[in-house]
Image (tube, rainbow, N blue to C red):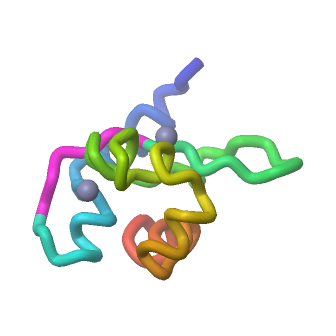
Amino acid sequence: MVTKAEKKHYDKLAQIGCVLCKHLGYGETPAHIHHIRKLGMKRSNADVIPLCSEHHLGKTGVHGLGRKAFESTYGLTEDDLLLTYCS
Ligand SMILES: [Zn+2]
Ligand SMILES: [Zn+2]
């Protein structure tokens, strides 16, 4: 279930474009919404970041690499991206 407020928030984030592409200097890339999952925590409205299909589901993406490899590959965490680009 996505509430109206969430939908609005997601639309706004999607318009930012992929935050990893941004970080890497690739410019604006159309993005999906990725939910950051935290152990033992409820999913909240704020814990989503926009990622392009490659950086989301591709081999070099957060799901393809897994969180640990993602962090060592790019030298940052999903939370860093959230705080830097989405707040
Ligand atoms: Zn990207
Ligand atoms: Zn995802």
Looking at the picture, does residue 4 appear above or below residue 84?
above
Residue furthest to the left: 27
Residue at 50 percent across and 44 percent down: it is: 63
- Measured from the top left, where is residue 28 in percent x and y? 13, 60
* Apparent side of residue 67 relative to residue 50 in the rendered image (left or right): right
Q: Position of residue 23 (x, y in %)?
A: 28, 76
What is the tally of numbered marks visible in this picture?
0
Residue at image position (42%, 65%) is: 86
The image shows residue 74, relative to residue 5, as above or below, that is below
Residue 29 within the magenta-colored segment of the rendering: yes
Residue 26: % across, % down: 13, 69
- Describe residue 40's horizontal placement relative to residue 83 as left or right: right
Residue 81 coordinates in the image, percent (x, y)? 45, 70
Residue sitting nearer the eye, 65 or 12: 65
Left or right placement of residue 50 versus residue 82 in this view: left
The single residue placed furthest to the top in the displayed view is: 1
User: What residue span does the magenta drawing correspond to?
Assistant: 28-33
**Prevailing SS of the magenta stretch:** loop
Q: Quadrant of residue 77?
A: bottom right
| Residue 73 shown in magenta | no
In-front residue for pair 40/1: 40
